[in-house]
Amino acid sequence: MSYLELRERICCMVNASIDEKLLDIKDTTIMANLTENNFKAVMKRLKYHALKNICKKITDLLYIYESKGVSPEVAELIIKKTDINIGKEIEKVFVDMFYKSPDLFQLNERNSKIKILHVFNYTYEETGIMH
């Protein structure tokens, strides 16, 4: 297996995990109140940016392992033990998007800070990408 194949395989697993985590957000009050177009736009952006951020972290790690002469098989074992909290990554992207594009959420400035708390009023469990 090459490093390129390893990266693709891990990023596919991350993609599936992101889809699972997005289901948690899908049914929150703030999302339910969005128009269909805004809902799709928010979900699409969340997925794109979370996947991009996480896969960049993985790519950076793989580059380090490859440059040190670590075999892809050993690198895979190390990556599997690395705790990348996908829920927290999605939350960071969501909060960033929420404040940069409040129009997507059909909110005015006054109530936006209150509404964001309703989306993330739970804590994601510490979950690695392979769990």
Image (cartoon, rainbow, N blue to C red):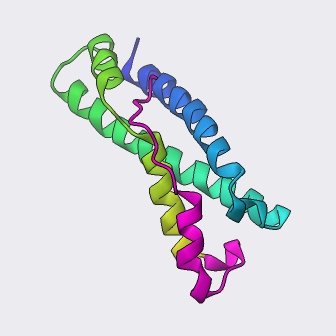
Say if 39 sits above or below 53 in the image. Answer: below
Say if 70 sits above or below 82 in the image. Answer: above
**Quick check: is 106 in the magenta stretch?**
yes
Q: Residue at x 50, y 50 (%)?
A: 122
Q: Magenta stretch? A: 102-131
Q: Residue at x 67, y 60 (%)?
A: 42
Say if 34 sits above or below 107 in the image. Answer: above
- Count up the numbered dots: 0
Viewer-side residue, 1 vs 101: 101
The residue sitting at the right extreme is: 36
**Where residue 46 sits: x, y (%)?**
59, 54
Left or right: 111, with 74 as reference point: right
**Where residue 103 sits: x, y (%)?**
68, 79
Left or right: 81, with 67 as reference point: right
Residue 58: which quarter of the image? top left
Q: Residue at x 49, y 58 (%)?
A: 93
Residue 30: which quarter of the image? bottom right
Say if 19 sits above or below 111 in the image. Answer: above
Viewer-side residue, 19 vs 73: 19
In this view of the protein, can residue 21 be seen by the observer?
Answer: yes
**Where residue 124 sits: x, y (%)?**
46, 43
